[in-house]
Image (cartoon, rainbow, N blue to C red):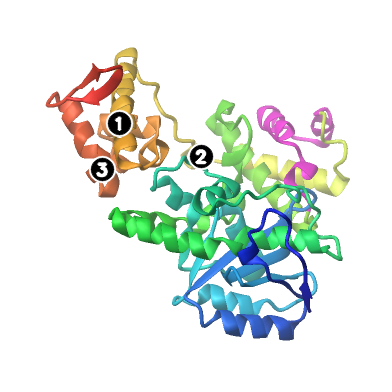
Amino acid sequence: MVADFAPPPHRPAGLRGRVLFISTTEELERFCEQASQSSVLAVDTEFLRERTYRPRLCLIQLATSPDSIAAVDPLAIDDLEPIARLFRDNRIVKVLHACSQDLEVIDGAMGCVPSPMFDTQLAAAFLGHRMQLGYGALVEAYTGVHLPKAESLTDWSRRPLDPEQLVYAEDDVRYLPGIYDQMRAELVERDRLSMVLPEMQSLLDPSHYRHEPMEAYKHLKRVSSLTRKQLAVAQEVCAWRESMAAKRDIPRKWVLADEVVVELCRRAPADEGRLRRIRGTEQLSERDSAALLHAVSRGVARPASQLPSLPKRSRPSGEQESVVDLMYAMLRIISERSGVATQLIATRDELVDFMSGREGASLASGWRYELAGRRLEELLGGSCGLTVKDGRVEIL
């Protein structure tokens, strides 16, 4: 169905138009057929995840231009294959802003992710904007339009959605095609496109949006405080917790809170009596507690050769810290001159990796080496330095 709504006061008169809310397969097919003729497709999603294990997709916003926008209702349409076809179409660039959560939601709902993909938040960091630039700030910087956040806490699963909700939802994609055109032109002009595209491609690696149960322990709060033997228990218990949360579609913390898991790893209870002494296990059924004890026993029985370990960074010495401070000062100068955000070029840990000659250091190859690594090598080799001139640090 198509409804005509007057846009809110923040929208320029040139963008007045219809809000297209799609709730049937036929409407979806028609819109996607038209969208397949475009070279650009802006994408955003609205979802809820507070009470479920998997984020629940509640709305999909798509746009090929400011005047061709649709809000698709996945709660009313069972088959989203028409959208999936667009996402898999290599002729169409899919434009998103801060894509990580959207990729997780889309992959869970459709079994695919939008590719090729252009992330405007990442591109902004190559064009003189700060890291993690918000969508509202991006739109204001490129269009002068101020977007209110009145619907940021909306329950998008409730129906019907009112006209104002749909307008705000569609504003999340309305400006992206035009911003993409501007950003791409800027990147080409500054000879940055070849730097940006591989970074965006790396965001499509499934490790960024799919959760492997046996890797879940790495995200446990205070996991670094555990011994390797305790880590083996954590790996088994967290994998069990993931499977239970996924099976029941509830947040993992509703199965067991992180602090309870850590205590379990430290105590490694061998029977239900000892398990029940740990506060936070009282909600477990007898069947769950038996399965949990079995997971603990698997971790305890793990042979030494199969114990997991977390990568630990040795703390730099005082002298090394001073060198890293100097490197970071040069990095900030390079960032200011190039317009590429400092944190995108390298973090302090990555500076330590480079200084130490660690294999695979990000600054040792690619565009990061060309932009900053080469100069940092000169600094470390003593062939260049830093000085203060007119109150500013400069490279000698």
In the image as oriented, which residue stretches furthest toward the left?
383
From the viewer's perspective, tell me whether residue 206 is left or right of residue 289: left
Q: Earlier in the sequence, mark 1 or mark 3?
A: 1
Residue at 24% across, 25% down: 394
Above/below status of 18 relative to 289: below
Find disc 3 in the rendering and name its residue. 371
Find disc 2 in the rendering and name its residue. 308
Residue 193 in view: no
- SS at mark 2? loop
Q: CA distance from mark 1 to mark 2?
A: 40 Å
Residue at 55% across, 55% down: 99
Res 193 → quadrant: bottom left
Image coordinates for residue 118, horizontal then vertical, percent: 46, 61
1 and 2 marks in contact (CB < 8 Å):
no
For badge 1, the amino acid type reads Ile
Q: Which mark is residue 386?
A: none
2 and 3 marks in contact (CB < 8 Å):
no
Q: CA distance from mark 1 to mark 3?
A: 11 Å
For badge 3, the amino acid type reads Leu
Res 349 → quadrant: top left
Which stretch is magenta? 250-278
Find disc 1 in the rendering and name its residue. 333
